[in-house]
Amino acid sequence: QVQLVESGGGLVQAGGSLRLSCAASGRTFSSRAMGWFRQAPGKEREFVAAITWSEGITYYIDSVKGRFTASRDNAKNTVYLQMNSLKPEDTAVYYCAASSKVAFPPKAAREYDYWGQGTQVTVSS
């Protein structure tokens, strides 16, 4: 089992920044990559970014590329999502998730084994 605890969400004005954190505990060695997803009201959960634990290789969807940065601190078993130049359309509940898949990036929710509880990000215009 892997437990994921997210933090760092909040309310920010358009153009502002937030940093999300996702602390992993338990059998963390079983996961190869961490992903970030988001779900806006009335919409399906959307893959946003992913990062590998070992090399820190990252992948982003086009709409956040250049604005969001995923990173990890292996010593702390924690991954981060730095979100800059936030837009109202970034408003959503953000989830981190752990994947044991070898192929990278795992973009589908079904490729992830464990999920955090989610943290709300609200960007006002």
Image (cartoon, rainbow, N blue to C red):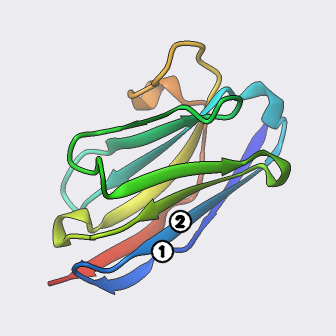
Residue 41, above or below 10 = above
Name the residue type under label 1: Gly
Q: Earlier in the sequence, mark 1 or mark 2?
A: 1
Q: Write down the residue under mark 2.
A: 20
Residue located farthest toward the left when viewing the structure as drawn: 125
Q: Secondary structure at mark 1?
A: loop
CB contact under 8 Å: marks 1 and 2: yes
Residue at point 45% right, 24% down? 105
Q: Position of residue 45 (x, y in %)?
A: 32, 45
Residue 19 vs residue 65: left or right? right
Whether residue 19 is situated above or below residue 72 in the rendered picture: below
Q: Look at 28% across and 51% down and name the residue there.
A: 64
Residue type at the position of mark 2: Leu
Q: Quadrant of the C terminus?
A: bottom left
Disc 1: which residue:
9
- List x then y, in percent, for residue 20: 53, 65
Q: Quadrant of residue 5?
A: bottom right
Instruction: Calculate the distance from the C-alpha at mark 1 to the C-alpha at mark 2.
Output: 6 Å
The structure residue drawn at horizontal position 41% and vertical position 42%, both measured from the top left corner, is 49
x, y percent for residue 98: 62, 36
The quadrant the N terminus occupies is top right
